[in-house]
Amino acid sequence: MAKQPSVVVVLTTISTEEQATALAHQLINEHLIACSTVIPAAASHYRWGGKVTSETEAVLMIKTTSSLVERLKARILELHPYDIPEFIVLEASDVAEAYAAWIEASTKTQEN
């Protein structure tokens, strides 16, 4: 049996659903992610500039392999409009073999 690729879910937030969709498409086109689920209109509450702030943001749930995390992180930090973008990696402990294989195939390029 072939070794299952290590699948991770990366979370980030961004101002609008349109920005989230554009970022997801860019990362898919660059083979850094297999897919991203956009959750529009999430209520975010945080401290910024010394005061508590509340805003509506879109959440991206990004699926990729652990081997691409550092490249993905660098690219998100480059493309993201926020000064300090959220970048949280969640390791999947159990993934359906066919889904893991699809993620690996979707992120493969001739370079990786």
Image (cartoon, grey):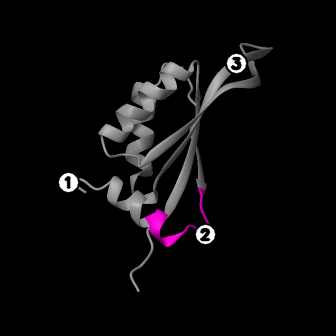
Quadrant of the rendering where the C terminus is positioned:
bottom left
Three-letter amino acid code of the residue under disc 2: Asp
User: In the depicted view, which residue is nearer to us: 71 or 42?
Assistant: 42
C-alpha separation, residue under disc 3 versus residue under disc 2:
31 Å
Q: CA distance from mark 1 to mark 3?
A: 38 Å
Question: Residue at horizontal 29%, vertical 56%?
Answer: 108
What residue span does the magenta drawing correspond to? Answer: 91-100
Mark sitting earlier along the chain (1/3): 3
From the image, tell me which residue sits under label 1: 111
Q: Left or right: where does residue 10 sit relative to residue 4?
A: right
From this view, report whether residue 69 is shown above or below residue 54.
below
**Chain-order first, disc 2 or disc 1:** 2
- The circle drawn on residue 56 is 3
Q: Nearer the viewer, mark 1 or mark 3?
A: 3
Residue linked to disc 2 = 94
Instruction: Name the secondary structure under disc 1.
Output: loop
**Mark 2 or 1: the one toward you:** 2
Question: What residue lies at 77% left-to-right and 14% top-to-bottom?
Answer: 50
Indicate which disc, 3 or 2, sits on the residue closer to the N terminus.
Answer: 3
Label 3 crowd bin: few (<14), some (14–19), many (20+), radius 10 Å: some
Q: Tell me how far mark 2 sits from mark 1, CA to CA.
A: 27 Å
Q: Quadrant of residue 72?
A: top left
Q: In the picture, which quadrant includes the N terminus?
A: bottom left
CB contact under 8 Å: marks 3 and 2: no
Q: Position of residue 19 (x, y in %)?
A: 49, 21
Amino acid at the residue labelled 1: Glu
Q: Find the residue positioned furthest to the bottom.
A: 1
